[in-house]
Structure formats: C-alpha cells, structure tokens
Image (tube, rainbow, N blue to C red):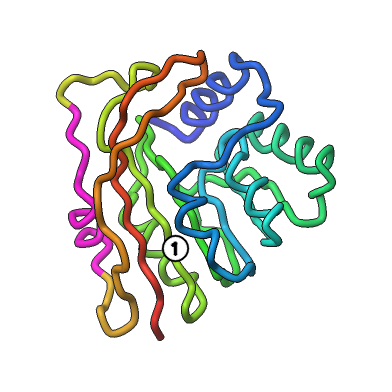
Amino acid sequence: MSTTDAVTFWDDLYATRPAAVNPQPNPRLTETVASLPPGDALDLGCGEGGDALWLAGQGWHVTATDISAVAVERLAALARSQGLGDRVVAVRHDLHSAFPQGGFDLICAHYLHTPFDLDRSTVLRSAARALRPDGRLLIVDHGSTAPWSWDQDPDIRYPSPREVAAGIDLDAANWTVERADAPRRIATGPDGRTAEVTDHVLLIRRTA
C-alpha cells in the first residue's frame, strides 16, 4: 500500500474521533522516565500527544512526530493552550521514508504498529543510533489485542521484547537492554471501555 493510503488511513482515524482535551501519558512511559533528568526527547507516532505533553510538563524538550497531519496539528494546538508551545515541536513525519534528524536523550515508540509497509527494525535501529550516550530508547508494543483496537486479526502474533531486541540487532558493546518484560494492566479505550491488556516493554540504553 502507498504512503498516500497510510496518510489517509491515519488522518481519517483521528478525524473521526473527537479531539482529546487532556490526553494521558502511557503508564509505561511515566514509570520509566519519572526518575530521569530532563533532556531532549523524540516521540515516534505521537498520536493524541499525551506522552509529549507529559514529557514537556516534566521539563523535557520534545520533538513529536506522526504520519497524521490531523494528530500533529491537534497536538501543536494543545501544547500552545497548555503553555508548552516552547517545549513541544509537533511535525508530520513518515518513518517509512526517513528518520528525524538530531540526537536525543530519550526516544519513545509506543504502539508503533501499522497495517502499512514499515520496516520497524530499521526504524528502531535508527532510533537507537540517534541516542546520545546514556540515552534511552523505550519501545512499548501491544502484547494482546484490546477490544477497541483497529486490528482485530485473530491470528495476529505479537513478537516478544527479546525478539524485537534481536531484530534490531544492536552491538552489545554500545547498547544494553535494561528491561524486557510483558506486564499486564487495566486499560481504558477511546470509548471509555476497560479491559486487561498486556504490554511488551523493551528499554535500551546507549552506553557508548
């Protein structure tokens, strides 16, 4: 499928939802980052912007990217309305074509799943290489299918965090895996429904 198809799909997905007034950060982000000193962060697939806004509120300077112009424009407006416009730069970016420029202390990739062509391993390898020394790459994937997910394929298989790490194929002399597990939690969907879901969490630190 083409990039145009992907843009249309994600723009339509967000356009059919009411704009979030107070999007919440992902809990795996807050539990991982709360103790880290603020720096420069990159949010890959920022969606409604809960992660980017939370990070900015903690003192981080955030570059938030998404393939959907609808999502990006909504996030930029929210950041300005919350007085965080100087800490959040929201830009439309297609990771299928290129990786954002710059060096970062934190890169987040939460639920970076898509029905369109995307070489995730290459994207995540590029993310790891964009880390500064002691920077961290936080990858949180679905480990189960929520009732409100756009992908209800009963045959879908979610790679484990260790499998994702193996696919990125990083040199252990320069990067180390600090966390690779599959915790469960009660999540709330866009329509207010709750369900128990499994997250696949991978945290990588650049050591050199």
Position above or below: 136 against 51: below
| Nearer to the camera, 11 or 55 | 55
| Nearer to the camera, 200 or 30 | 30
| Nearer to the camera, 9 or 104 | 104
Q: Is residue 193 left or right of residue 47?
A: left
Dot 1: element: helix
Residue at left offset 25%, top offset 79% = 172
Q: Which residue is mark 1?
A: 127
- The verdict on residue 88 being magenta is no
Where is residue 140 drawn, in percent x and y?
37, 47
| Nearer to the camera, 60 or 132 | 60
Residue at left offset 44%, top offset 63% = 127
Where is residue 204 drawn, in percent x and y?
36, 66
Residue at left offset 52%, top offset 27% = 10
Name which residue type carries label 1: Ala
Residue at left offset 19%, top offset 57% = 162
Q: Quadrant of the N terminus?
A: top left
Residues in magenta, as a range: 156-169
Position above or below: 180 against 193: below
Position above or below: 111 against 13: below
Where is residue 194 drawn, in percent x and y?
41, 19
Q: Is residue 34 left or right of residue 2?
A: right
The quadrant holding residue 164 is bottom left
Where is residue 205 drawn, in percent x and y?
39, 72
